[in-house]
Amino acid sequence: MTTPPPGLRERKKQATREALREAALRLAVERGPDRVRVEDIAEAAGVSPRTYNNYFASREQAIVSAVTADREARIAAAVAARPAGVRLADAVTEAVVEQYTNTGERDREALLLITTRTTLRDAFLDTTAGIEPPLTAVISERLGDAGAHAARVLAASVAAAVRIAMEGWLQPTGNAGAAGSLGAAGLVVPSGSLPDQLRAALSPLAPAFDAAERRTQP
């Protein structure tokens, strides 16, 4: 299935979104997340606050978008790129682990910020729900028309499993208010191996993936 290239309007929207998340991350690194306003991000990206609100609901959402940008589509693309003979459960697990752990310098910078505020952690965790729509499409294509309902259930289950793994990995410390500069926002501490936690969370879904594949085989 060939996806047509985006038109001019869509390219402009993508460019605006990219400018906003780049500005949000840069300002958050320079000033600290609590000292960045939506108006500051919009001004740095060369758009109005009203335009900003068409793309992001909060400053936290824009900041975490710098690390989560297009990740959902990349997971789906990675699953689609696996050979047809590869077990679907393995294809999905490896795609998720790959896209959540192979981070660049900018992503690591954003993750460092995420670990300084529970509000950023919560916004980061909320992005896992975005896995469902593109993953549903690629699983449905793999399973065929008879597996359309199963594809949606499986994709939603993957999104939930990833959130559970990330919640376990990014643990709030609790009473961070005494830390002074952190205030009531709190501190988040990564715990354990993220690839291991992702695989452990996704492992219970493997029998369901296997059953769906068997049902759609001729």
Image (cartoon, rainbow, N blue to C red):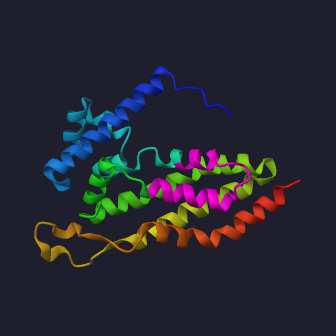
Left/right of residue 85 with respect to residue 100 in the rendered view:
right
Q: What residue is at 35 percent from the left and 49 percent from the top?
A: 104
Residue farthest right in this picture: 218
Q: Quadrant of residue 172?
A: bottom left
The total of numbered circles placed on residues is 0
Where residue 125 sits in the image (x, y, percent)? 41, 61
Q: Is residue 36 at all visible to an observer of this figure?
A: no
Q: Quadrant of residue 33?
A: bottom left
Left/right of residue 134 with respect to residue 97 in the rendered view:
right
Whether residue 88 is in magenta: the answer is yes
Residue farthest top in this picture: 8
Q: Nearer the viewer, residue 160 or 93?
A: 93
Quadrant placement of the N terminus: top right
Q: Nearer the viewer, residue 163 or 196?
A: 196
Residue farthest left in this picture: 180
In magenta, the rendered stretch is: 75-100
Q: What residue is at 47 percent from the left and 66 percent from the top?
A: 195
Provide the major secondary structure of the magenta segment: helix
Where residue 212 sits in the image (x, y, percent)? 76, 61
Where residue 77 sits in the image (x, y, percent)? 58, 44
Vertical placement of residue 105 versus 166, above or below: above
Left/right of residue 138 with respect to residue 38 in the rendered view:
right
Q: Quadrant of residue 39?
A: top left
Q: What residue is at 54 percent from the left and 65 percent from the top?
A: 160
Where residue 206 sits in the image (x, y, percent)? 67, 68
Whether residue 54 is in magenta: the answer is no
Vertical placement of residue 172 versus 146, above or below: below
Q: Nearer the viewer, residue 185 or 173?
A: 173
Q: Is residue 59 at all visible to an observer of this figure?
A: yes
